[in-house]
Amino acid sequence: QVQLVESGGGVVQPGRSLRLACAASGFTFITYGMHWVRQAPGKGLEWVALISYDGNTKYYADSVKGRFTISRDNSRNTLYLQMNSLRPEDTAVYSCAKPALGYQLLDPFDYWGQGTLVTVSS
Amino acid sequence: DIVMTQSPDSLAVSLGERATINCKSSQSVLNSSNNKNYLAWYQQKPGQPPKLVIYWASTRESGVPDRFTGSGSGTDFTLTISSLQADDVAVYYCQQYYRVPCNFGQGTKLEIK
């Protein structure tokens, strides 16, 4: 069965960095683009970033552009999110999400991880 | 960017009654080349990740009860739950996946009256 397990969250001071990981299993990771979505405490869903199946195409929300970098290691079936220059407004649960169809950049998300909490506070 | 706006923000419906949630996009999400609306609905219960309910605006995800119906085209969409069950209490989000950024609506909290 499909599993997406995020890790790397924690408490970090403003301006510092953090790298999140999403370990994928139960599907052919190398054939799927992947997304990061975040949810601030008590708030709605915010799309953060996406990466194509081969890692060559990346898109970011304006709110994180220039500070966050999405990447993947297809040999390890793992998705990453490098977060630099963190701000208090980046505090959220960060989840990875899998599109329903392979090779598609944009598709509905049929599987989500449970998420990892990032708290940016001094 | 395509902005997604849901209404209402919250909704209380009696068990067995109909619940209707609306979603409006600031631009059309209809692809005229394949006549598909790139619109999905998700259900999120407390402490859980979102669950895909409807995609292509009206296609029910496998395992979703047939009391859930999606409708609409272009810029105006509706999620209808024909006979509300206790298990349907959740926050519902629409999402467009037509263009990046694939934005979500702000969510509609559905409760039992």
Image (spheres, rainbow, N blue to C red):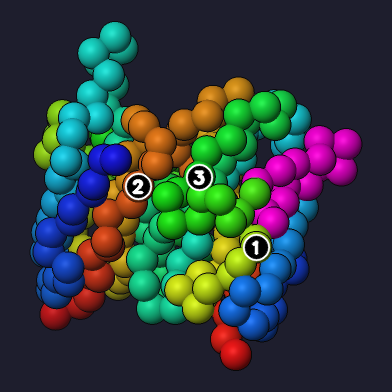
Horizontal side, residue B3 vs residue B20: left or right:
right
Question: Residue B45: percent from the left, percent from the top?
Answer: 41, 69
Cα separation, mark 1 vs mark 2, equals 23 Å
The residue positioned 56% from the left and 41% from the top of the image is A50
Cα separation, mark 2 vs mark 3, equals 12 Å
The residue positioned 18% from the left and 30% from the top of the image is B28
Q: Chain of mark 2?
A: B
Task: Look at label 1 and name its amino acid.
Answer: Asn
Horizontal side, residue B61 vs residue A8: left or right:
left
Task: Look at label 3 and name its amino acid.
Answer: Tyr
Residue found at the far top of this picture: B33
Residue A110 in sight in this render: no
- Magenta region, mostly helix, strand or loop? strand
Magenta span contains residue A43: no
Disc 3 is placed on an element classified as: strand
Q: Which of the two residues, A16 or A72, is positioned nearer the viewer here?
A: A16
Q: Chain of mark 3?
A: A
Q: Which of the two residues, A119 or A112, is positioned nearer the viewer here?
A: A119
> Magenta segment range?
A70-82
Residue found at the far bottom of this picture: A122
Q: Nearer the viewer, mark 3 or mark 1?
A: 1
- Identify the mark nearer the N-term, 3 or 1: 3
Q: Chain of mark 1?
A: A
| Marks 2/3 same chain | no
| Residue under label 1 | A84
- Crowding around mark 1 (Cα neighbors within 10 Å: few <14, some 14 to 19, many 20+) is some
Question: Residue A35: percent from the left, percent from the top?
Answer: 57, 45
Cα separation, mark 3 vs mark 1, equals 14 Å
Disc ID at residue B103: 2
Quadrant for the C terminus of chain A, please.
bottom right
